[in-house]
Image (spheres, grey):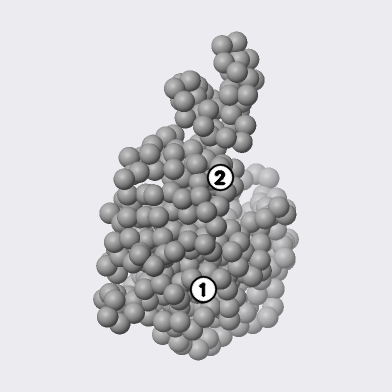
Amino acid sequence: MNDLAPLLTPEGRALLDAVRGTAPADELAVATRLRREHPAELVSAALGQARLRQRAGAKFGVHDAERMFFTPNGVEQSTRASVAAYRAERMKGLGVTSVADLCCGIGGDAIALARAGIRVLAVDRDPLTAAAARANARALGLDELIDVREADVAEVDTGGYDAVFVDPARRGGRGRIFDPEAYSPPLSWAIGAALAAPIAALKIAPGVPHEAIPAEAEAEWISDGGDVKEAVLWFGAKPGAFEPGAVEPGAVRATLLPGPRTLVGSGLPDPDVRPVGRYLYEPDGAVIRAHLVADVARDLDGGLIDETIAYITADALRPTPYASAYEITDELPFNVKKLKALLREREVGILTVKKRGSAVEPEELRRKALPKSQGSNSATVFLTRVAGAPTMLIGAPATPATSSAM
């Protein structure tokens, strides 16, 4: 069923309530029972929507997800609610009261903007996707602030809006799209639309090449709970239109959620390479994507363990929200037998394996190196390179209590 309308009827809504929380193993039995009183196609659609809602719970929260309507692509491509809320608050802080949300998908960003008190025109050319966005605005009581329009974004006049938000589709029939000009619409079109607006935000893949970022944009990489979620290009505010706020053309930021905690780049050169010290710092993924490892290293009085590896080493333990700290006890050339012997000697039974610059799979190393008679202690091993040589660094998460160097 490629139509949400039947699910929006009283019968469809009743079926959605009936199948809520159905486990995959129980679907056949539930479908067989419900098809005695309801059309088979409608039952299948309700069960399919229930599965999508369960998947969407991680992004939108269970409370919202159980009331919303999704498409498979909509679940996959939607912004996590916490990230959308952060962006909406930043828009609000720039004085924005109305936004044209182009390529709105199932409405996740429009919902966050409306909850920030911003009026939204949400546009998508796909009829089913636009219907889902409209249903979601209504289901969450935001339809007075969200106007959903089924149209080609290139044909929409955004002149009456304070800001434009563009989220081009980055998936096609063969999966994820890596070429920005193969986005739908292409990145060049989205940049043109952003430059024509008083204020604009353009969501792009976090792996975008820095050289593809226009000079007029501020680039911000956002992570949530340590996972990099997206990059955003911000444009504006233009003189005489709004207060300039925090948007700085040419600036680079890494923002970590929850928080938010934001690191603004200062254009530092790459840190020097130095021998492994007592502590190893693993920068947050947003910091790495934003090329701001040097800024974190400066604050930690640290350097790199290798010119191509984003691990920072330092002799002192200093607090930073932008990197996780580990106390290093051993530095060994890569050798599984030596690692296995060390773990056995220290009665390690819980092993965390991290890698950067190594082709070895963590699960494979864990299987080979962890003693069969496991102990109760834990350790972390980093598979990496130190000054170009394959190396294993062994240690554990560092806390102030583990060091007198604070």
Q: Residue at coordinates 48% horizontally, 20% vertically from top-left? A: 11
How far apart are the alpha carbons under marks 1 and 2? Answer: 25 Å
Q: Quadrant of the C terminus?
A: bottom left
Q: Nearer the viewer, residue 136 or 79?
A: 136
Tag 1 residue: 191
On the image, the x and y values in percent for residue 338 come to 70, 63
Disc 1 residue type (three-letter): Ile
Which image quarter holds the N terminus?
A: top right
Q: Write the residue at 48% across / 71% down.
A: 193
Measuring 56% from the left and 71% from the top, which residue is drawn there?
Answer: 189
Residue 243 as seen in the image, left or right of residue 41: left
Q: How many marks?
A: 2
Circle 2 crowding by C-alpha within 10 Å: few under 14, some 14–19, many from 20? some
Q: Residue 131's x, y, as percent?
A: 50, 41
Counting residues from the start of the chain, the first of labels 1 and 2 encountered is 2
Residue 121 visible in the snapshot: yes
Check disc 2 and report its element: helix, strand or loop. Answer: helix
SS state under label 1: helix
**Of tags 1 and 2, which is closer to the observer?**
2
Q: Which residue is mark 2?
A: 127
Q: Are marks 1 and 2 in contact (CB under 8 Å)?
A: no
Near-viewer residue (291 or 385):
291
Where is residue 331? Give x, y as percent: 60, 72
Residue 263 appears anywhere in the view = no
Task: Name which residue type carries label 2.
Answer: Pro
Q: Image quadrant of residue 94?
A: bottom left
Q: Residue at x 58, y 29 (%)?
A: 45
Q: Is residue 228 above or below residue 148?
A: below
